[in-house]
Amino acid sequence: MSSEPEEEPVSVLQRFEKRLEGLVEGAFAKVFKGVVHPVEILNAMQREAEAHKAILAGGRTLVPNRYVIDLSPYDHSRLAPYAAALAQELAQSQAEFIGEQAWTVYGDVIVEIERGDGLDTGMFRVTAEVYTGGDVAPVHPSPYDAPGQPAYPPYDQGGGYGPPPGHGPGGRNVRLVSGDGRTYPLQMGSTVIGRGDQANLRLPDVGISRRHARLDFDGAQVVLTDLGSTNGTMVNGQRVSAVALNPGDMIQLGTTTLTFRVDG
């Protein structure tokens, strides 16, 4: 029997442990000796995502993107100098795990580490929720409620959700639209998508590489090329290395989904 389904989470854990080893020169090993360990926290976060899955219209699986970790007062005080770094590593690893499962999240994966009064040393609690930047989202968030409808608000040329789209020959407007309605016009030539300073289109997503993918627009078509990203690039649920985009294609990078739109 194949054990492949069980290997994916392990690979995420292994990468997470490797990154922890290089963080603050082994301080984590001393901090967590005999008390709660980060890998246990990541395991619990993965279980929480699994337990809170919601099936959306169109067959997508939505999981929580905000995880609050309550540590015992003793553990929290010992961890304080490293809390921000640990939260970032946990968020990145959880984003990798969610990407491998091909699940959907709203926005970025967020991890917050807090003091949990009443918890014994070595104990911790994980609370997971779908967070949209304001209130906690309902189980079936409205952008995905209607089957066959676009997963973003309509673009309004008169005020809308961003600058006017890019213009190609023949008056074609080519743009990417994010799940929350932000619009990214594409200009002629190459556009690099990523998290780093060198990217033309920067996305604050821990699951996205610094130089993740490139879009080449020659006026007739747009070709999407993965630039050797850590988590890969998906189009309509399929991992791609390079592909010509069609109107309506859904591009997923990390936990971010962008829809390719062409007008004219």
Image (cartoon, rainbow, N blue to C red):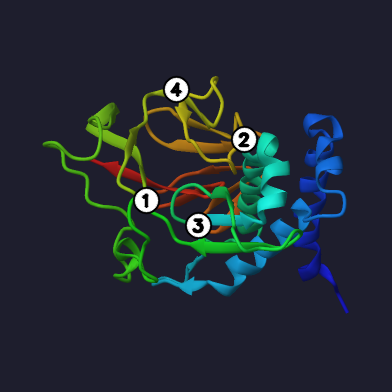
Q: Residue at x 31, y 58 (%)?
A: 150
Name the mark nearer the viewer: 1 or 4.
1
Tell which circle, 1 or 4, labels the residue nearer the N-terminal end: 1
**The residue under label 2 is which amino acid type?**
Ser
Q: Are marks 1 and 4 in contact (CB under 8 Å)?
A: no
Q: Which residue is mark 1?
A: 179
| Residue 43 locus on image (x, y percent) | 72, 62
Where residue 189 is drawn, which disc sits there? 4
How much space separates mark 1 and mark 3, taking CA atoms?
14 Å
Of circles 1 and 3, which is in front?
1
The image shows residue 88, relative to residue 101, as above or below, that is above
Q: Nearer the viewer, residue 63 or 182?
A: 63
> Measuring 47% from the left and 73% from the top, which residue is drawn there?
54
Label 3 to label 2: alpha-carbon separation: 20 Å
Where residue 214 appears, as percent x and y from the top left, is 54, 31
- Most foreground residue, 75 or 10: 75
Q: Which mark is residue 209?
A: 2
Sequence-wise first label, 2 or 1: 1
* Residue 133 placement (x, y as % from top left): 37, 49
Q: Residue at x 22, y 30 (%)?
A: 164
Mark 3 and mark 4: Cα distance apart in space? 24 Å
Sequence-first disc among 3 and 4 = 4
Image position, residue 257 (x, y; %): 45, 49
Q: Is residue 40 above or below residue 198?
A: below
